Amino acid sequence: MQFGFSYVGLIYLILLFVPNSIWAKNKPENYENYVKNESRILKILESIGQALVTCIVLIFKDFNVKLDSLWIIWLIISAVLMLLYEIFWIRYFKSEKTMKDFFSSLLGVPVAGATLPVLAFLLLGVYGKNLPLIIATIILGIGHIGIHLNHKKESSSKD
């Protein structure tokens, strides 16, 4: 692991934060009713994972492009997952913005808005051979995907 700025990490964070900022003004109707039922443990794991992932992807230059290695395949797959994440958001913003739209799958990936970025960051960690990012992403994934699966289950039972 090598300390240093990661421009790839910054790009990933921008791709993550921009649609989430837009979503803050385009939440599904009654979303707040689901938030109050979130598991405290999953919320803590999500918060810890978010903080760790955000810091780690910026302070290790392991994630910057290295064309001299076959490991680049992991970066390409990771980047494709981030592209799919952006497609998820475009589809959501064009939809009626219901809970069903927000927790929908994309190409068979369940709760794509939560799962795709977690998988992208996990594979970014594999590409960078960076164990701290892999561990942080697993923590984030347990919390973030867990929360979204619970919301999806709760919204399905209300339909």
Image: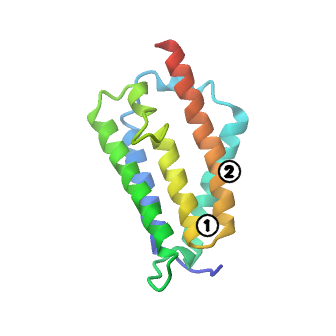
Please give the name of the residue rendered at 38% of the width and 51% of the height, measured from the top-left corner. Answer: 84
Question: How far is the residue under mark 2 from the one under mark 1?
Answer: 13 Å
Q: Which residue is mark 1?
A: 56
In the image, which is nearer the foreground, mark 2 or mark 1?
2
Amino acid at the residue labelled 2: Ile
| Above/below status of 71 relative to 109 | below
Please give the name of the residue rendered at 59% of the width and 67% of the height, measured from the top-left corner. Answer: 126
Amino acid at the residue labelled 1: Ile
x and y percentages locating residue 27 in the rendered image: 40, 32
Horizontal arrangement in the rendering, residue 2 relative to residue 63 (left or right): right
Number of marks in the image?
A: 2
x and y percentages locating residue 150 in the rendered image: 60, 28
Front residue (pair 23, 115): 115
Please give the name of the residue rendered at 47% of the width and 61% of the height, measured from the top-left corner. Answer: 78
x and y percentages locating residue 141 in the rendered image: 61, 47
Q: Secondary structure at mark 2?
A: helix
Q: Residue furthest bottom?
A: 68
Give the position of the N terminus as an image quadrant.
bottom right
x and y percentages locating residue 106 in the rendered image: 40, 40
Picture disc at residue 139: 2
Front residue (pair 149, 40): 149
The answer to which image quadrant residue 125 occupies is: bottom right
| Above/below status of 144 relative to 17 | above
